[in-house]
Image (spheres, rainbow, N blue to C red):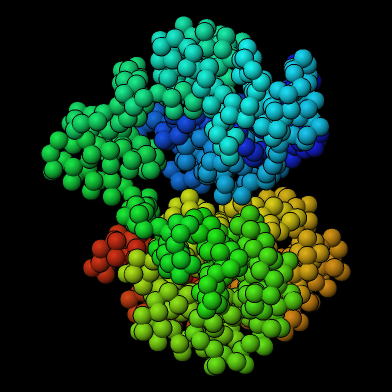
Amino acid sequence: METTNTTMVGREVEQAELLAFVMSAAGQALVLRGETGVGKSSLLSHAVAMAEQAGHTVVRAAGVEAESELPYAGLHQILHPLLANVEGLDDGSRAVLEAVFGGVRSDPPSVMTLGIAVLNLLSLATAERSLLLVLDDGQWLDDSSADVCGFVGRRLVGGPVKLLVAIRTDIASRFDTAALPELPVAALSDEDAARLLDRRYPNLGTHVRRTVLEQAQGNPLALLEMPAHLAGRPGEATLEDFGPHGASMPRRLQQLFGARIAALDESVRAELLMGALDGAGTPSDSDTVAGARYRMRDADQAVAAGLLDIEPTTCEFVFRHPLVRSAIVRMATPNQRRAAHRTLAQVHREHLERRATHLAAATVDPDEEVAGILEAAAESATRRGGALAAVAWLTRAAELSENHGERSRRLADAAFVAGHAARLGQAHRLVRSDLAPGSTESPASVLAYAYQALYQDGDVRSTHRQVAAAIVKLRDGGPAGCDEVRARLMILLLAISQYAGDRATWERTHGLLASMSDLVTEPERMYSAVWSDVTRHGADWAGPVEQATTNLPDLEPWEVGRLAVAAYHLDILNQYRPYLRRNVDRELKTGAVASGMIMLHLVMLDQMAVGEWDGAEETGQRVLELAKEHGYDLFTAQSQAYLAQLAALRGQSGRARDLQAEADAWARPRGLGFLTQVADSAGAIAALNSGDYEVAYLYAIGITSPGTFQPYAYQASRTLLDLVEAARHTGRIDQARAHALAARDAGLPDVSPRLALITYGALAMTAESEQEAAEMFARVESHPDAERFPFELARIRLAHGIRVRHVQGRAAARQYLVRATEAFERLGAAGWAERARAEVRTTGAVPRASTLNLTSLTWQERRIADLAAAGLTNKEIGQRLHLSPRTVSSHLYRIFPKLGVTTRAALRDALSRTVEV
């Protein structure tokens, strides 16, 4: 912050944004993003002051580089003050939190499970007052904590909790892909920079003043530190006083602090080095967390030099700025750093993971004792869900092993943990690191590398940068004859952007295309629009994509594949499926594996849309096996995500959750928003199917907030009904209505037939009058493509039938409810079918499984179904039929979906009753 004493200089826009954020009644998250020294920490303090003045509870925490490898260290720092003071937390949530914080031995929870436990804790903490969580230096938060913060931050809507995070622009972090709202913090304007400098240093000489303003470039920390650096120096200031020409601002500021560090006594520098390496000197609201770090002593000389401050409440030494810590570490010799790490390992001899961190850095030669400690720390981290830290410690333990056998065993353990954490691509990237393209490599080599990195490793971050740079190189005067390479690079860039699925990536891509002028072809413009944000850009392209079907035989298979992806987004994929079916085997046999798998995914998606779920299952399993066989991890995760959606539709909740967790665990750390949205969609559908509407709502708003359609989030419009239904069933009537109206106002009915169907359905579900409900439902029924989307149509009929029963009576509702029931039974949507049958019963009709479903049972399955319906247990059935209880259970697992039921009571009804309409 740009303050002199208590007066802020500039930042009017940021102040207004933070005021609205803090005073808003709705829970939300906000990320402040800016370069080092730009004033993010001071803006956080400003927000804290406003919150405290408004009577809110405030919890402050800070990421620390030294703790970035310690699983859940950041989350513990944030939550510890709440855990210590909140009562009434349910046993399940407390057990989850204790598992990750090391209190009990348990299986590591998923991000979803831990996130829900955190939300439960936050709900209790806000029983009396609103809560503001403030996290500084979020880029240093450990990955496990950052993932949970991202999950929680996306689901604060409607509650009294706010999350405010500050991160540096020059350091990558998990918050880069957390899909949280951001407020950029730029440098001060020239006028505000001059005001700040003049207020702090009113007697600065003209030449020095001009030099400082020029070199600081509006950076507040630089404005305040540069004059002090020049104080007492002979002669006039020169540019060299602030670092070499062209140096980054962090490097210049480190040089300023470095000069002061060099002037300290050796003992004080050693004290500061141990503090820097252990995360000491970072303010925290948690005494337990602060107590776990090294406490610097006898460092008053550093305070006088402007490197440390004294925290008023604890009287502890704290670093004035994180760059001071970085400068101290950078200036130390390797031997000095190792000596400090050895001392710190002894300080933390009772804290296994902290001790391991320091021993790993302090040890050079093989040492079996240290290797054993690192292995024990890895086991501890794995138990708490810190797989990445475990892999790092096991790898280092292998390096320090004294014999080949132990080295091999530890490396095998590291590979095992990495495999379960879906990090096999990490090893591949390391092997190829010396082959990664640099600025001197040709666009063709970039193309080859990027395809491999995307398909095998799911790398969208570095590949986007590299491919974009190669395109710019060609745009600005590449060699002749490179049109084909440029075109392939452009399509690849669009594919990368689609898999990234976030606004920043797509905006960079669109900016590059805009700079290409006439070099961009019409198909590339179409893909850029439809693949990125069909809600905003799709309506104009449905005609061209549909018209292109007349020319499919004349196109190359990969060209058809690209058009078919656009057709999927526009819900006209059925017109492409026959061609895809005919050509997929040829593509696979001729070695075009990637093209073949893309075609299979598209076939599967269309099968799911039109209700051919058995075929979709077969197709999905086929492409999953191909992806695993060829090492295409991206397509493996994509197949799992689609199969999770299918399992959720069919009521196979356990399988859906397992597949969803696998896909999400691989995709989310890589920033693959396309896949994480599918995973969240599967989670929402599974929860709706099982009647867990609160969880369904949390998943749905993780994709988009009620009343909006998150830009470039392709599942935002596709999950319209999921969010509306979840909101209605959890009493959020206003949010449900706002979302339906937003769909209408966004023009979704003009984009695709499916979006038209679900928009009218959502409007009917949330209608404020019976006339509007009837009109919107009539639009659903009369839509020419309504029967092409049987699952959506059945959901809408079920909801409308329930409404009609409440208003017009049972007889009027029966026709809608029976038709919905029949559709769900035909599809094999077990949970939905059971719910629909229950509604049919309320109208006086008694549902029974259709003849079609009964005849689908084998002779053995029918015998088992009859015995289960009669009330026999699995063990009793097994004894009568000479089968094991496990075999009986497996048969019932297949029988329930065939009959559209999920319980034995429903099975009894299905086998013994008839439908009377």
Work out whether residue 571 or residue 462 is closer to the camera in this orientation and state it.
462
x and y percent of residue 208 in the render? Answer: 71, 23
Residue in the image at 77% along x and 36% along y? 189
- Residue 642 appearing in the image: yes
Q: Is residue 783 left or right of residue 235?
A: right
Image position of 646 with respect to 347: above or below: below
Q: Is residue 259 left or right of residue 840?
A: left
Residue in the image at 32% along x and 76% along y? 860
Residue in the image at 84% along x and 60% along y? 768
Image position of 284 with respect to 627: above or below: above
x and y percent of residue 365 in the render? Answer: 20, 31
Work out whether residue 375 or residue 303 is closer to the camera in this orientation and state it.
303
Residue in the image at 74% along x and 27% along y? 210
x and y percent of residue 201 in the render? Answer: 74, 17
Residue 164: name its quadrant: top right
Work out whether residue 23 or residue 96 is closer to the camera in this orientation and state it.
23
Residue 9: name its quadrant: top right
